[in-house]
Amino acid sequence: MVAVSAVADRYREGCGAAVARFDPRGDPFLSTRFVPPERPTTFLRRARLVARLDRALSTPLTLVDGPAGAGKTLLVADWAADLGRPVAWLTTETADRAPGVFWAYLMQALRTGGTPLPPDVGCPAQASRVDHALLARLAAGLSDRTVPAILVLDEFERVPSLEIAEQLEFVLHHAGRGLRLVLVTRNEPLLPLHRYRAAGSMTEIRGADLAFTPEEAAAVLEIHGLRLTDASVRGLVRRTQGWAAGLRLCALAAQQSPDPERYLKEFEAGRSTIADFLLAEVLKRQRPETQDLLLRVSVVERFRAGLADTLTGRTDAGTILARLRRENAFVEPLGHEWYRLHPLFAEILRAHLRERHPGLETRLHRRAASWLSRWGSLGETLAHGSAAGDWQFTSRTFVDDLAIGQLFSGLYTDDLAELFSRMTADAGGPAVNLVRAARELAGHDLDRGLAHLRHAEQDLGADTADTVDRADLAPARLSAALLEALVGRLTGSPARAERAAEAARELRRALPADRLERHPELTALLLAHLGATRLWAGRFDEARAALSQAVGCAGGVATAPARHDALAHLALIDYLDGRPGRAEKGAVAAMKEAERYGLPPSSRLGIGRLVLAAVAVERDELDEAQALLDQVAEAHSGPQDPVMAAAGGITGARLLLARGDARKAAEAGAPAVTAAVFSPWAETEAALVTAAALLAEGRPKAAAKLLEPQAGHRPACAVAAARAELAAGNTTQALDILDRLPARAGGPALTVRATLVRAQAADRAGDAATAQRLVAQALRDARRECLRRPFIEAGPWIRPLLGTGPNRELARGWLSVHPGPHAVPAHDGTRQAAPVVERLSTRERDVLQRLAQVMSTEEIALDLYVSVNTVKTHLKSLYRKLSVNRRGDALRRARELGLL
């Protein structure tokens, strides 16, 4: 699980590039999985089946389905080698059951095999899932090809996932003529094969086709130096049922017999019987040290001489493996001095190992884990450590590698959670407790997480903020510092997060730079936690500094969750500063980062969506705001950190205010948030909501009194207080409050409201020209941000000023003016239309444009990368806003209003 280092920036910029080297877990792509197996010297080319495969290029799907050892893989590898066209190859593994891992490897297989993908396709970030939009972009990119890409997925039975099968069928269908897929499998995949058969768009090579004919069997035996009579060959084919592995093993064993023909008549039919018989015979004919090596290496998926020596306790593995490879028996070279056993052979060997040496398998896993911790990948090390039941070793290896951030980053979360869920209760030690704490905190179980973290820190012998005096404890203490920063964020404790950050800065000096570079997510997560905690405390400038550092962290997919989190919190700061336009851009940037790397819904439906909902309320796009809040509530039903809880409660309260429910808004505006310190901005926002509710109930004096304590040092409260005083008839006091505001008191959301208070005061004083000028100024400032709520909140006095003179032109396009039932008298006595202030949202405009292209609901959903239900929701809102009930009427109305 090595993370991005030198190629981090290139990977981040475009994981579609040929230089991409890392999968969604941060592990380097295993290049051996993209290479077809070598054809052994004893391989027989089967012309009849190769011809079938040649003809299969005319169909989108080819299925090569047969039992283990039927010769499927070598058949397709032989065909691909001599095809004369690029063929992308992927040997699947059990880890590919995770959709993110499967698709990352599939896309890398295409690139490696000579099929470049468009840069905007993106790549999966989380091992456990892949974004539907990414699959749509992949299918679209393939469909543009003039020459179809050929992709072979070998050993596809290792991916028995209905979810992946549905995703694969989606890509295959929408890629059209741009993709030819060859599945090599032991059993039928979960694809809708009946549809492909009915349409004649699938080529099938089944077990019966793969069975060796007597002529082919005779040729195989002859390659092995065996010449049998026709009757003996037919008898052998009948007993083995043409099973390729059985024939090959028979030939290998018979080579060593003085009477091969008689030898091959001495066993009964049946694959398991043949395998067991031949295994016993073959192993018995091997030297004892070779037998021992084969049995021991069967516990690992791949091995090289050093690992084999560790498992046997000897130093002769290199010689034995070289001989076995020359003899083309038992072992298959993977390249770079790595080997593997034939899967069927390894399975039988493991069964014999358990029978011959009970208990040895666990000890071998422990030896393998120890060797792999120095020479292999972290993922392999953890797998063998857990298989050995050695949780202290497994946890210590994980923590010492600085990989604890992987439990939060979404890159390896599900796999690690599943692996460590098997940890036994009797396991102990600082690393074990750190892993337990991280797992609990990742699930927002603060109490249990803190208990484990305290145990870990006690085991370490000192608080994480202490000076490092032992280099071997530095990784554990740095991991503890990350968890402390998270606890600071979850508890709203800036002091705790600051201490953790300072401890981390000291601890980094005691660690090798290359190890820190391997795990950039650790630093990015720590900065994001620190920034979020500073934001809660209202220290916006310091929060920006930490969050901006997190956004700038290299590491591509490894740091994507932290970068997305930081971008969303920066957007929230912009919103709280009264800059909804900038906030929207930041939230959209966060969403794009999440979509680019396929982050899970729980990540992408967080602060960023809340910011978009808050901006939608300011623009009076209330249905859009409600839909966004519903999405967030569905994705975050459990405990939330203080920033998330406060922002969600306040946004929901503002929406209730906009819908006219002042009582519920006042109740929702002060959500119960548990935190170590109070938040100035949360307090301010709660006061503003309550004051607005009081104003809506006709109690301006109560609203002014509520805001008075904060009006002197919080500009938003000062503007709201001025509005309350004006509503209470205290024009002079209102203007005095505004006059005391600093020159740059806030963003457009604040300045527009302040300008409208002055305009209302002028209108009340009978100064129509000043009122008209100030409303025009407010319109110009609001137009850039599409702010509508300030004009709705202003009340009836503003309607004549909006519908007459130059202000009408300033409102055109975003405050759409058209004749309607609420027309108001103009100053000249004619009736002018009041502005329609609820405009179409950006997404509703997207849907409207596609309606004009006569696209169906399903086609719109596919084009926008959203669900059909989401399109229907937008259509319902679109019809309501245009006061129509049908598509045709919506298009006519949109053209009347200049929307199309």
Image (cartoon, helix red, strand yellow):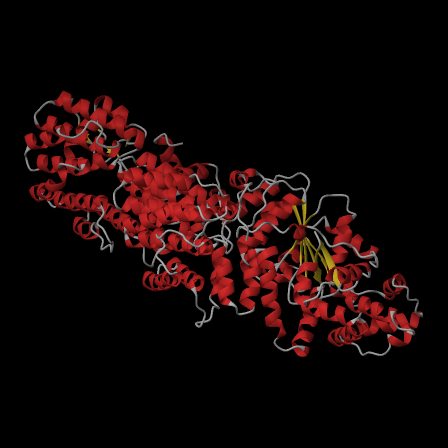
Visible residue check, residue 595? yes
Q: Is residue 80 above or below residue 621?
A: below
Q: Is residue 767 above or below residue 308?
A: above
Residue at (60, 47) in percent of width and height: 107
Question: Which residue occupies the foreground of this view, 440 or 870?
Answer: 440
Residue 899 x/y as whole percent: 37, 32
Residue 360 relative to residue 479: left or right: right
Quadrant of image for the C terminus: top left
Residue at (57, 58) in percent of width and height: 373
Residue 176 relative to residue 558: left or right: right
Visible residue check, residue 843? no
Residue 393 relative to residue 304: left or right: left
Q: Is residue 64 above or below residue 504?
A: below
Q: Is residue 211 above or below residue 545?
A: below
Question: Could you say which quadrant of the image residue 66 lies in?
Answer: bottom right
Residue at (7, 42) in percent of width and height: 701
Residue 471 x/y as whole percent: 46, 53
Count of number-bearing discs: 0
Question: Which residue occupies the foreground of this view, 651 or 11?
Answer: 11
Question: Which residue occupies the foreground of this view, 409 or 137?
Answer: 409
Residue 768 x/y as whole percent: 13, 23
Residue 668 relative to residue 557: left or right: left
Q: Residue furthest front?
A: 469
Residue 467 x/y as whole percent: 37, 51
Question: Could you say which quadrant of the image residue 444 lies in?
Answer: bottom left
